[in-house]
């Protein structure tokens, strides 16, 4: 038996440390590098253990666990979605995650993932758009200007060069907040009075609204030829954003069909409706965009491998930063079978 | 919008704090109160959302997530099982868990659960034995004297009055460690040279070995009339401890059949073999022990509701103890839609 020191300790990245890590790396660099890791993991899609997330639904929202493993590392994210939280001063979505060593089951990292999820969602959207949007895309409509909107804008700028934003939210103060937060970062920004106005002339439409209900953020007449739709907000059963007719005119790309058919826009379509898996496009097995007038739709719901990518990326950036705490999370008796003895020794030490 | 202070903070119980909490409450009191909470939750079994745990198996072991909810609280445990860990100075099983508010999805508690799992497993075994063992039981054989063995002994003493232990382990030093740890606590203890010797005259047989393989810790001839078998160690696919013939002679009680049929001793039996659910006995819907000569078997694999009970029990004991840290786990911008602005303000503060 070898005694390894500090087996009890798991590095923990708090919200404060995550913000400082992102800022130290630089928001754009962080998004670009994270996008590359997300893309790398999509490319080796078949090496992952995959399962639809395990959701516990309630009247007010959902709590989900999203595990996956590549055989060497295991990761999972805890994430909730409670649209009414905003009114109570809470986040609609909060999250944390853990990365572990498959070989011994010990956690290697515990981290906040509210901010990290916002970054990985945006990075994943940009990865999809890199393969699906017209290469000369410069302008993006963002419908829904809540917590995720600025991250989408920054990722699309850092990764695709999008520099023109057309914002719309049913609450104008949300658009104003978004425009204010993105000021001085090289965007031309227009706040629009309707979704119809926002999509005018846009190369890419990002929908990222938060209501937990069937909604029709986009109707068929609003979607012209050549558009790429990045549909992010429709991500649980009963929550969609696009009119069904748009889906029928689009080529649809998804993360993991068994999950997307439950949670994505395509819950409006028959269970056998043809969709293309994003990883197949990234791996070169299927075509992405094939023409200038094609409408492409990334029906994003967020998948466990993306969180896995985010966890392993964060872990790779931590050494030497000091931007983590050491958490006494795991019992580590000197003799592993002697858990009870550890309790007794604690008792003796206290006496 | 109401601003609630410190929404970012989640109470965290470290290993050190858990040991101090258990000792402050008292090991026996902790086990007794925890057993009562476990029993209370079994009694309201039908109010829980139940699912078999989500297991990620590898060559070396398994990592599992065990979620459940009663509609008001949501809990999950992360737990690994890696039998070879012991040789490397690590715990075979480590765990941590989270309790959350279903209404808003926010975590209320993050805690180590390696020690807590040992306590809840023992408490649950004792709850089952309270309903299934002969009421005059005083003597217990414990086969497998690893990390769980002393907890089983203490729970059976605190809850059933078991005061005579007959220990056996293929590694005698494990039995010696167990006997040493239980010294001066009111037990008569005999270390035995074989499983056959250990079960002689025992009212209850507890099997709690750790190998991840089909094993035959108990053979049919070793199990006399009237015995209660508390089979704890056989808890994943391909890992059993009892000879099949014992199962055929016993009345079998389980936690959650869909999970136990995959993981428990009854994986050796046809999928429709009749078993009784423990909660039905506790709720008075089915009979437990019906006679002096009946062989009862609690085919324990550990279920999510037991961890839920442990989490809510720990949470109830924390206030006023100071035995937790405050973890900055959740992003909490002043305006909930302004997650990106929080990052910008952090940047400004650092500049």
Image (cartoon, coloured by chain):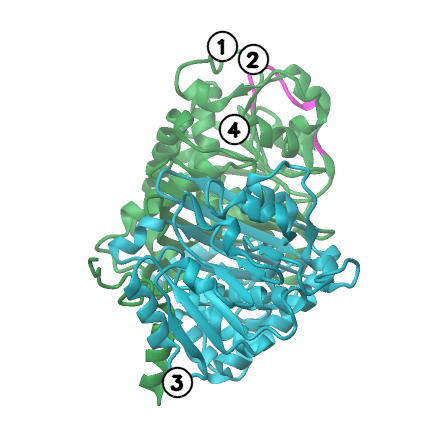
Chain colours: A green, B cyan
For disc 1, the marked residue is A290
Specify whether disc 1 shares its chain with disc 3. no
Q: Crowding at label 2, few (<14), some or many (≥20) Cα neighbours within 10 Å? A: some
* Horizontal side of residue B15 vs B302, given as left or right: left
Q: Are marks 1 and 2 in contact (CB under 8 Å)?
A: yes
Of tags 1 and 4, which is closer to the observer? 4
Of tags 1 and 3, which is closer to the observer? 3
Specify whether disc 1 shares its chain with disc 2. yes
The chain to which mark 4 is attached is: A
Q: Label 1: state its secondary structure.
A: loop
For disc 4, the marked residue is A255
Q: Label 3: state its secondary structure.
A: loop
| The one of A208 and A350 positioned closer to us in this rendering | A350
Task: Decide whether residue A221 is among the magenta residues.
Answer: yes
Q: Is residue A270 visible?
A: yes
Q: Crowding at label 4, few (<14), some or many (≥20) Cα neighbours within 10 Å? A: many
The magenta span reads A216-228
In the displayed orientation, state which residue is furthest to the bottom.
Answer: A351
Spot occupied by residue A107 in the image (x, y as percentages of width and height): 37, 53
For disc 3, the marked residue is B184
Task: Decide whether residue A266 is among the magenta residues.
Answer: no
**Residue at mark 3 to residue at mark 2: CA–CA distance:** 79 Å
Which residue is painted at 33% across and 59% down in the image?
A10
**Residue at mark 1 to residue at mark 3: CA–CA distance:** 78 Å
């Amino acid at each position: 038996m070898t005694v390894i020191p500090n087996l009890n300790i798991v590095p923990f990245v708090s919200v404060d440390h995550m913000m400082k890590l992102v800022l130290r790396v630089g928001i754009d660099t962080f998004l670009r590098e994270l996008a590359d890791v997300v893309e790398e993991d999509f490319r080796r899609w078949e090496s992952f253990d995959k399962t639809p997330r395990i959701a516990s639904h309630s009247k007010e929202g959902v709590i989900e666990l999203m595990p996956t493993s590549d055989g060497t590392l295991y990761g999972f994210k805890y994430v909730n979605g409670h649209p009414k939280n905003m009114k109570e001063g809470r986040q609609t979505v909060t999250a944390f995650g853990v990365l572990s060593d498959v070989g011994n089951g010990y956690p290697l990292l515990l981290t906040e993932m509210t901010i990290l999820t916002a970054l990985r969602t945006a990075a994943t959207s940009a990865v999809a758009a890199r393969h699906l949007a017209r290469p000369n895309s410069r302008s993006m409509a963002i419908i829904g200007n809540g917590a995720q909107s600025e991250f989408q804008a920054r990722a699309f700028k850092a990764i695709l060069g999008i520099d023109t934003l057309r914002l719309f939210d049913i609450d104008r103060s949300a658009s104003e907040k978004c425009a204010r937060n993105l000021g001085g970062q090289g965007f031309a920004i227009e706040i629009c009075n309707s979704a119809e106005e926002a999509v005018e002339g846009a190369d890419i439409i990002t929908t990222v609204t938060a209501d937990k209900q069937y909604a029709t953020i986009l109707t068929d007449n609003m979607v012209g030829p050549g558009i790429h739709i990045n549909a992010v907000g429709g991500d649980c059963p009963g929550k969609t954003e696009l009119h069904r007719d748009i889906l029928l005119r689009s080529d649809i790309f998804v993360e993991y069909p068994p999950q997307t058919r439950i949670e994505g826009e395509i819950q409006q379509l028959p269970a056998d409706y043809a969709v293309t898996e994003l990883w197949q496009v990234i791996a070169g097995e299927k075509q992405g965009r094939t023409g200038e007038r094609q409408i492409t739709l990334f029906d994003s719901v967020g998948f466990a491998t993306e969180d896995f990518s985010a966890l392993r990326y964060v872990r790779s950036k931590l050494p030497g930063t000091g931007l983590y705490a050491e958490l006494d999370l795991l019992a580590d008796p000197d003799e592993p079978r002697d858990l009870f003895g550890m309790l007794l020794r604690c008792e003796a030490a206290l006496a």
